[in-house]
Amino acid sequence: MAWNSTSVQRVRAVRLLRSLLQQACDHERSLGDPVNLGPAVNGPLVNAVPFLARDGLLLLFQSNRPGGYGKHDIWMTKRASRTALGSRR
């Protein structure tokens, strides 16, 4: 990611750091563009420390979003296929 000095772009970069993204990798190990998992997964606050299970379907992550039991809870999402985006559970 390239950084420059405009405040608008800095704000976008900070917001990205609080969101979980998906990035495809092909057989030649080329990475596609990152895709934000969107509001179904990303809460309004910090979403971090993602762990993707070996099957590529279950994603565990830490978030301090509303509705949890403590300050930083572990949340999960499971997607239908390896190419589908997840939904919050």
Image: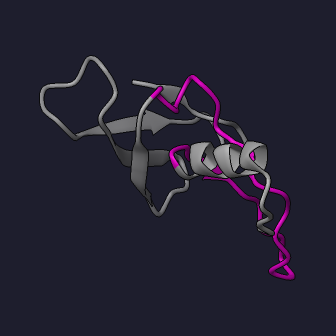
The picture places residue 54, in percent across and down from the top left corner, at: 47, 63
Is residue 82 visible to the viewer in this orientation of the structure? Answer: no
Q: Residue at x 37, y 47 (%)?
A: 61
Please say which color scheme the image uses.
Answer: one colour
Q: Is residue 46 magenta?
A: no
Total marks drawn? 0
64 is higher (above) or lower (below) than 7: above
Q: Residue furthest left?
A: 70
Q: Give the side of residue 25 with respect to residue 38, left or right.
A: right
Residue most extreme to the bottom = 28
Give the quarter of the image for residue 4.
Answer: bottom right
**Span shown in magenta:** 18-44
- Residue at image x 64%, y 37%? 37
> Would residue 74 be seen by someone viewing this image from the given angle?
yes
Vertical relation: 8 (above or below) 49: above
Residue 2 position by quadrant? bottom right
Q: Is residue 26 left or right of residue 67?
A: right
Q: Which quadrant, please, contains the N terminus?
A: bottom right
Say which of 34 and 10 sits in front: 10
Q: Could you tell me residue 77's position as x and y percent?
A: 45, 35
Q: What residue sits 39% from the left and 24% below the top?
A: 89
Query: How far from the left and from the top, in percent, is residue 23?
Result: 72, 58
Q: Residue furthest top?
A: 67
85, 82: nearer the viewer: 85
Above or below residue 79? Residue 62 is below
Q: Is residue 67 left or right of residue 23?
A: left
Q: Position of residue 68 (x, y in %)?
A: 22, 24
Secondary structure predominantly adopted by residues drawn in magenta = loop
Q: Is residue 24 magenta?
A: yes
Up-down relation of residue 64 to residue 48 (above or below) = above
